[in-house]
């Protein structure tokens, strides 16, 4: 059965893909992407989702800056099992879900790790002393996530069997 278009001109039909990757390929995929959705678990067992900026540190952990009292940090300290959906800048770009174990690092131990976090997202800061002072003043913390499993790198689109039934 052919499925007719709903309205407007026909668009190219993209077919969804899923590409299995090893840890090295996963981290290579994540490094240039900084839009994450972090899922932690609330006390009542329901998910807490937080849109965050993130990166990958030199040890291969996903890193996210936070404040000690934020739900994501409190939840991750209570239950370190977290998930991160790493999105591409382009809404229709590839994405991946990473599950892992979180560690929340507080000041003063977080200071050097926050420098590494900034570098992996934005490069060099024009004044590291100023940056460090701001992180101390804000009492920032860092969430580090060690990947334990991950899904395939996925792209959106039609399932192949549906795309085949659509008008060309």
Image (cartoon, helix red, strand yellow):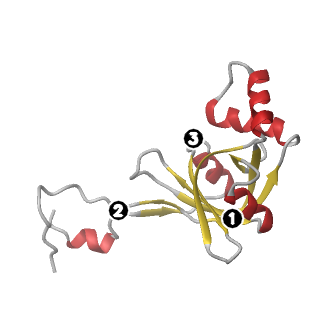
> Crowding at label 1, few (<14), some or many (≥20) Cα neighbours within 10 Å?
many
* Distance between the alpha carbons at the discs numbered 3 and 1: 21 Å
Name the residue tied to disc 2: 157
Q: Which residue is mark 3?
A: 32
Give the quadrant of the N terminus: bottom left
Marks 1 and 2, how far apart at CA? 27 Å
Direction from residue 30 to residue 61 in the image, left or right: right
> Residue 139 bears which disc, if any?
none
Mark toward the start of the polypeptide (1 vs 2): 1
Can you tell which of label 1 and label 2 is closer to the viewer? 1
Q: Quadrant of residue 9?
A: bottom left
Q: Give the residue pinned by disc 1.
A: 82
**Which residue of the protein is positioned furthest toward the right in this rendering?**
109
Secondary structure beneath dot 1 equals strand
Which residue lies most toward the top here?
126
Rendering coords of residue 87 (x, y %): 51, 52
Quadrant in the picture for the C terminus: bottom left
Q: Is residue 101 in sight in this rendering?
A: no
> Which element carries disc 3, helix, strand or loop?
loop
What percent of the width, then of the height, locates residue 77? Answer: 79, 62
The reply to whether residue 72 is visible in this rendering is yes
Kindly indicate whether the residue at mark 2 contacts the one at mark 1 (C-beta within 8 angstroms).
Answer: no
């Amino acid at each position: 059965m052919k499925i007719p278009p709903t309205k407007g001109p026909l668009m190219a039909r993209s077919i969804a893909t899923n590409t299995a990757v090893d840890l090295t390929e996963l981290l290579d995929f994540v490094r240039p992407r900084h839009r994450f959705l972090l899922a932690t678990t609330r006390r009542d067992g329901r998910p807490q989702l937080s849109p965050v900026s993130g990166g990958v540190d030199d040890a291969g952990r996903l890193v996210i800056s936070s404040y000690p009292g934020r739900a994501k940090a409190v939840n991750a300290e209570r239950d370190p099992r977290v998930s991160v959906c790493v999105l591409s800048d382009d809404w229709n770009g590839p994405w991946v879900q990473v599950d892992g174990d979180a560690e929340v690092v507080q000041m003063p131990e977080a200071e050097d790790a926050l420098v590494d976090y900034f570098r992996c997202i934005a490069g060099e800061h024009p004044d590291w002393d100023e940056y460090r002072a701001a992180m101390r003043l804000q009492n920032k913390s860092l969430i580090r996530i060690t990947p334990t499993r991950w899904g395939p790198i996925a792209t959106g689109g039609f399932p192949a069997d549906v795309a085949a039934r659509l008008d060309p």
